[in-house]
Amino acid sequence: MPKSAIIQGMQFNDYIQFDGLGLADLVRRGEVSPGELLGIATTRADQTHSQINAVVRRYDDRARQRVLQPFSPDQPFAGVPFLLKDLFQEWQGVPCSWGNKAHARALAPVTSDVVRRWVDAGLVIFGATNSPEFGSRNVTEPSAFGATRNPWDLSRTSGGSSGGAGSAVAAGILPVAGASDGGGSIRIPAACNGLFGLKAGRGRISVGPMAAEGLFGAAVPGVLSRSVRDSAAMLDVLQGPESHAPYWMPKPDQSYLSAIAQPPKRLRIGFSTESPTGTPVDPQALAALDDAAKLLASMGHHVEQVKLPFDGKQLSADFLTAWFSAMAMLVAELGRTEGLKPSDFEPDTQALAAMGRTVSAPELMTCLERWHAHTMDLARFHAQYDMWLSPTISAPPLVIGALNTPPALHLVNKLLSGLGLFGLVRQTSFFQSIVLKNMGWTPYTQLANLTGRPAMSVPLYWTPEGLPLGVQFVGGVNTEATLLQLAAELEQARPWFGRRAPL
């Protein structure tokens, strides 16, 4: 990607040649203005909206005011257009709907830590991207705002829950966008859209001040980007303690951006081909994994196939038990504080909350203790290997609507909820089969969330049909720098920045 160029009257084709740091460098040198960049980004958002439906809210007035104000030379992303995710990334005084239209009536009472840090870094926020309701699905198809489509194939999903962010970056609206990951929600859209996505480890980035942690520490804010260096610089911006955070990770020895200038040591990498839930894995996902393993070996890393380092079916069950409980709490809280009624929530959300209400305190505590057991399993693996490698998703991006709950099942769920029978239903083979169907496309990503370990999806492979299909790396505790170094090495060996979605 160009790092220096003279831009006169920048056009879209010039704009997409630069990552976020590159655009900020042009701003600092006076070769392009923040207003010009904002105009290109908003025009591209307007042009693509009817096709991809990535941006669900605009803050044009605030953005126009921002570009008229001075920027500091030490702001790493000075003047660069940016989009928040419409989920737990609050900006005081404007809505953050969490994918729910009724909740959008409430204006954010405070600015979240990550948004404050993005503003301080010089980013020009002009909107928010689509997310499934409460981030509860691995596709972005909320009834409130409609489905977000994949710029590589408009019939396909862009993944979830940061699907709007992934689609916006892949479509060239901007080079990097706000995202978050509670069960794979950065890495899944990265894999679907040909992007780089890093989920930082637990405690690295604050989720406050509206909450101390998300989903028992499993949920982490972050970004989706086209370049590794943008993600590294963004982690420099976002990492670090806040006084209200319950815990935090130690500051790295050097900045993440400077770390990627150095190659990683030769790594021991174990990879697994089977699905953790026992569901089928598409041949293209296996081809992506095989391609990555061969590339790594050619670069001098030790790569070998290993058994799964954890009990995948139990881990999925433990993830869902906590997720159900979190949905029950969230629905109850919004009912209490904002007066939202059951009809204000999607049927799937109502069903998840109903199942959560059947989880007893001892069951939840036992589940969380098993989270620690999974963490110890992974620690034993990392005592032998630096990274676990897998597909990010088990198949190419799904067709829009592939995971929709049938209307008849919605009626059954409503009846079961009214009768208070979800506690029994959760134990049936029928329910387990539904869970496996929905988890079967994304069985690899929850491991890093439950264990609090950093992980990333790297865009190394495209199918013969031209669809992106990323691979995932899970590192040990406090290995964000090593992951980024490896990603930068892979980016140099197999550049992806220049690949453009056909939109």
Image (spheres, rainbow, N blue to C red):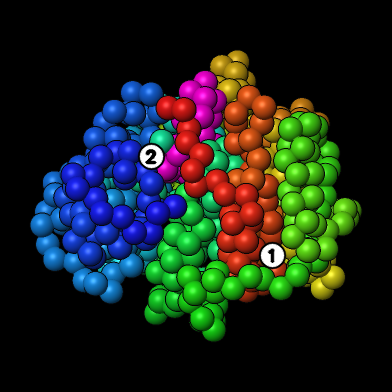
Please name which of the two marks, 1 or 2, marks the residue nearer to the observer: 2
Q: Where is residue 254 drawn, in percent x and y?
A: 51, 81
Badge 1 amino acid: Gly
Residue range (magenta): 149-170
Membership of 278 in magenta stretch: no
Q: Which residue is mark 1?
A: 475
Which quadrant: the C terminus?
A: top left
Name the residue nearer the viewer: 280 or 214: 280
* In-image side of 363 versus 214 (left or right): right
Name the residue nearer the viewer: 503 or 388: 503
* Residue located 72% across and 44% down the image: 391
Badge 2 amino acid: Gly
Q: Which residue is mark 2?
A: 172
Q: Where is residue 332 drawn, in percent x and y?
A: 45, 47
Against 73, is 168 above or below? above
Against 262, is 419 above or below? above
Name the residue nearer the viewer: 132 or 215: 132
Mark 2: few, some, or many residues within 10 Å (few <14, many ≥20)? many
Q: Where is residue 279 drawn, in percent x and y?
A: 80, 34
Against 1, is 468 above or below? above
| Mark with earlier residue (1, 2) | 2
* Residue located 59% across and 56% down the image: 492
